[in-house]
Amino acid sequence: MTTVDELHLALQEICEELQQRDAMIGELEAQLRRKEAIIQDLKQELEKYRVMVKPLTQQVSERIRLVCEAGPSNKGVYNGEENNIDRLNGRSVVDEKQTIDSTRSKRLAISAEPTNADYNAPLKKTPKNALSKELIKHAILDNDFMKNLEPVQIREITDCMYPVEYAQDSLIIKEGEVGSVVFVMEEGKVEVTKEGKFLCSLGPGKVFGELAILYNCTRTATVKAVNDCRLWAIERQCFQTIMMRTGLVRQAEHTDFLKSVPTFRKLNEETLIKIADVLEETTYSKGDYIIRQGAHGDTFFIISKGKVQVTIKVPELEEEKYIRTLYRGDFFGEKALQGEDVRTANIIADDSEGVVCLIIDRESFLQLISNIDEIKQKRYDEEEIIERKKLNEEFVHLKLTDLKVIATIGVGGFGRVELVKVNDDTARTYALKVMKKAQIVETRQQQHILSEKIIMEEANCDFIVKLYRTFKDSKYLYMLMEVCLGGELWTILRDKGNFDDLTTRFYTACVVEAFDYLHARHIIYRDLKPENMLLDIKGYVKLVDFGFAKKLQIGHKTWTFCGTPEYVAPEVILNRGHDISADYWSLGVLMFELLTGMPPFNCADPMKTYNVILKGIDAIDFPRTISRNALALIKKLCRDNPAERLGYQKGGIRDIQKHKWFDGFNWEGLRSRTLTPPIIPQVKDALDISNFDNYPPDMERSPPDDNSGWDYNF
Ligand SMILES: Nc1ncnc2c1ncn2[C@@H]1O[C@H](COP(=O)(O)OP(=O)(O)OP(=O)(O)O)[C@@H](O)[C@H]1O
Ligand SMILES: Nc1nc2c(ncn2[C@@H]2O[C@@H]3COP(=O)(O)O[C@H]3[C@H]2O)c(=O)[nH]1
Ligand SMILES: Nc1nc2c(ncn2[C@@H]2O[C@@H]3COP(=O)(O)O[C@H]3[C@H]2O)c(=O)[nH]1
């Protein structure tokens, strides 16, 4: 071999070595990257853990409290297996409590240990047949320490259990060791001993090994296979992930929900989390009595899904009286916790899809909730409601044929409004609104009409027209109402051109009172205009036409586009969802129209009107006749942003009543109806229709029948 060949060979070797080193460097770099990624993951995990550690501590201590508070049943923990608590740790019952108490404080301490449980990590599930699933579920429900787990947690644990086998005589659990697995026995038999002494034997369908996992202590006993055993097992990490994940998700859901409820929204985050943490969820079927009047009560409820009816038993009336309906976000049950411990009303689940309530016990209620002003000061006007029902009772036996039409006093979208008397009684008259069913269906207003009935029938406010009774036949729906013989405010405005400041103030105040009543009950009116404001014989204004009124769920908005173009708020036009703040906008528009004779946003074409509304109130020229204070109030009511409108802020509708424009206004006099109205209508007697326009007789053909049944509840 020549020197050149030798050199070639050497070079080749060096090249190969270099290549190998390159490969090694590549591999080391890859390893480094992997390790960096692991470090990154661990850091993230640590961060997540830092965030989670507090709720976890709370959750675990809560669960332990649950077990501890299980009271007498604690004693029987292992009674099923010819065993008792005395033998659990070879101690007395009192000692056992101490054991659990000491594990509780221990539990709090261990929550500071790093845990690998990542509640976002996918859980490893092991497919199993339905029989095994049932066996595991029943084993958990049979175990006093685990039966309080939530159904979803039991389901997840069942899914994640994997099969293991132990041969006869093998040791499954050794007393004193650190435990990491919970078992459910599928087949075979085990023997449990403590310090060499026999405690019990367990067969199929039994859980064991749960104590060390639940209370994070070392194994409290030894478990040995008596014969070949087939078991289902779950690792502590997986078990804890399930407990934590469902607990955290539930907690986050409850916190979010509470934040959406105005009553609770104002609380600080810490209190909200504490409340969310102690809420227990319960589902009721339609018709269930959640609370019975007269029973003793220890719990407070918040509705998270569905609706309930409140009824009250009145001594002199046979049946229970319906008082009101409560919806998602509403609460009940506080009275028994504040006063005499006795329930003051019935609460009945009223939703075919079930009612879900979040329940808080007395202790937590007193600690966390009883100080919330809205709950502390909650007063019910049940007597007033019963009075209102009694008013309607006068008309229960009335037949449609008893009503005699005197004249037409109004024409609305669905038909006419007639002045009627009952048989020959001319001393009292009523307004009968007659609506064509076919036309309601054609314009898809069924829901609106049903809601109009419910709201007007219940409303008990001097500034809202009362509905006494409804009738229906195959062609029409009828509403028998209190009549306002002073006529429409619209007619007076038309005749007078416009009103002065003081007159406008009186009528606006009547509307403020009506809105105060409605909004306190989460009802939005949505059709304010002088046409819907009627004068009674004294000259006080009452709202009529509740076709667009709607009871809102607390904290919720509604999206139906409705109202009269000149009066609709920008968010309605923009379909952004609206709530009671839309009524405050229309109040500003009403003030402007009463003071000037014309609404501020007013074009021949509704499309153009909407465009002007979207440009805002600041683009409108205010005539000089409008006083400075009136202008200021209108501008505060007609803010583009609903949240900025006066009436919708912390002070509520009181902010409007306290506005400078109302300075010196006698609100008390208005409420007690002692204040002299600016215009007193001329009304001779109950038959006098001179304040209404003349309406020619209805020449239209009789409408078609509609027996489809949508009006069942009317
Ligand atoms: N209780 C009442 N007392 C006196 N007049 C009434 C009464 N109810 C209604 N009217 C008269 O009938 C008119 C039409 O009534 P209402 O607005 O309730 O009907 P509507 O069909 O819902 O009308 P719209 O098409 O405006 O929605 C009123 O503007 C008023 O003039
Ligand atoms: N300490 C105790 N454990 C029992 C008894 N009967 C069954 N066991 C089970 O034996 C298991 C031993 O491990 P763990 O302490 O994790 O959980 C224990 C229980 O699941 C009993 O009477 N006392
Ligand atoms: N007494 C009364 N309770 C009502 C009314 N509306 C809702 N409720 C609730 O019904 C609940 C019944 O049980 P509680 O007496 O504990 O508390 C009561 C209130 O929370 C009402 O008009 N009157």
Image: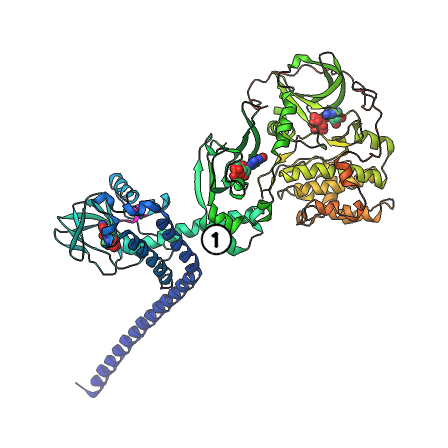
Q: Residues within 10 Å of mark 1 (few under 14, many from 20)?
A: some
Q: Quadrant of residue 516?
A: top right
Q: Is residue 237 visible?
A: no
Residue toward you, 317 or 182: 317
Q: Quadrant of ligand 1?
A: top right
Q: How is the image coloured?
A: rainbow
Q: Is residue 359 above or below residue 19?
A: above
Foreground of the two, 97 or 219: 97
- Label 1 sits on a secondary structure element that is helix
Question: Which quarter of the rendering shows the N terminus?
Answer: bottom left
Image height of 93 relative to 449, above or below:
below
Most common secondary structure along the magenta stretch: helix
Q: Which residue is mark 1?
A: 274
Amino acid at the residue labelled 1: Lys
The picture places residue 3, in percent across and down from the top left corner, at 20, 88
* Residue span colored magenta: 157-161
Q: Identify the residue at horizontal 80%, vertical 42% (top origin).
A: 665
Residue 288 in picture, x, y percent from top left: 45, 31
Q: Nearer the viewer, residue 12 or 33?
A: 33
Determine which quarter of the picture holds residue 538. top right
- Residue 160: say if magenta: yes
Check if residue 394 falls in the magenta segment. Answer: no
